[in-house]
């Protein structure tokens, strides 16, 4: 499976792929902690998460990391701009849910 950098360009060099996958700062797009201790995390994965014929490839994802260690997939994106906007949208939704439960 092909890997892509944060700009959506294919990565041919396996060593470069591994270096970027180990680089937490490169992978992290946004992270926020919820009032319940869970984390909303949006990251670059480098791997197309969707249909391989789709352009741009879906190389970013947002997940909730629960306090029990489980994760819930929320969304995937093709660009960093979409990923940042998606993270903010999910964060606003989660804040609304926690405010309603308070």
Image (tube, rainbow, N blue to C red):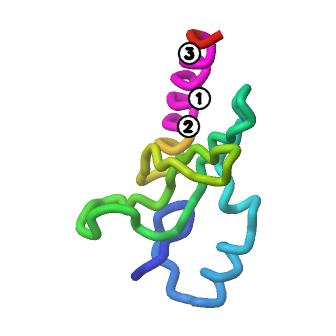
In three-dimensional space, the C-alpha distance between marks 1 and 3, rounded to whole angstroms, equals 9 Å
Q: Point out the residue furthest to the bottom here.
A: 14
- The residue shown at (23%, 67%) is 53
Asked whether residue 88 is drawn in magenta, I would say yes
Q: Earlier in the sequence, mark 3 or mark 2?
A: 2
User: Dot 1: few (<14), some (14–19), or many (≥20) neighbours within 10 Å?
Assistant: some
- Give the x, y percent position of residue 28: 68, 54
70 versus 4 height, above or below:
above
Q: Which residue is mark 3?
A: 96
Q: How packed is label 2: few (under 14 Cα within 10 Å), some, or many (20 or more)?
A: many
Residue pointed to by mark 2: 87
Q: CA distance from mark 3 to mark 2?
A: 14 Å
Q: Tell me, for residue 91, which label it has, or none.
A: 1
Residue 67, how many percent across, how many down?
70, 44
Above or below: residue 50 compared with residue 80: below
Q: Are marks 3 and 2 in contact (CB under 8 Å)?
A: no
Give the residue displayed 54% in from the left and 18% down from the top: 97
Kindly indicate whether the residue at mark 1 contacts the one at mark 2 (C-beta within 8 angstroms).
Answer: yes
Residue range (magenta): 85-99
Give the image quarter of residue 54: bottom left
Q: CA distance from mark 2 to mark 1?
A: 6 Å
Give the dominant element type of the magenta stretch: helix, strand or loop. helix
Residue at figure coordinates x 65%, y 89% from the top left: 15
Q: Element under label 3?
A: helix
Q: For the N terminus, which image quadrant? A: bottom left
Residue 50, percent from left and from top: 33, 61
């Amino acid at each position: 499976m092909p890997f892509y950098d944060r700009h959506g360009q294919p990565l041919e060099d396996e060593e470069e792929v591994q270096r970027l996958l180990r680089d937490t700062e490169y992978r992290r797009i946004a992270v926020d902690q919820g009032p319940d201790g869970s984390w909303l995390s949006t990251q670059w994965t480098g791997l197309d998460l969707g249909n391989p014929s789709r352009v741009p490839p879906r190389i970013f994802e947002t997940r909730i990391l629960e306090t029990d260690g489980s994760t819930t997939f929320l969304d995937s994106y093709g660009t960093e701009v979409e990923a940042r906007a998606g993270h903010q949208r999910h964060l606003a939704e989660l804040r609304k849910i926690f405010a309603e439960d308070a």
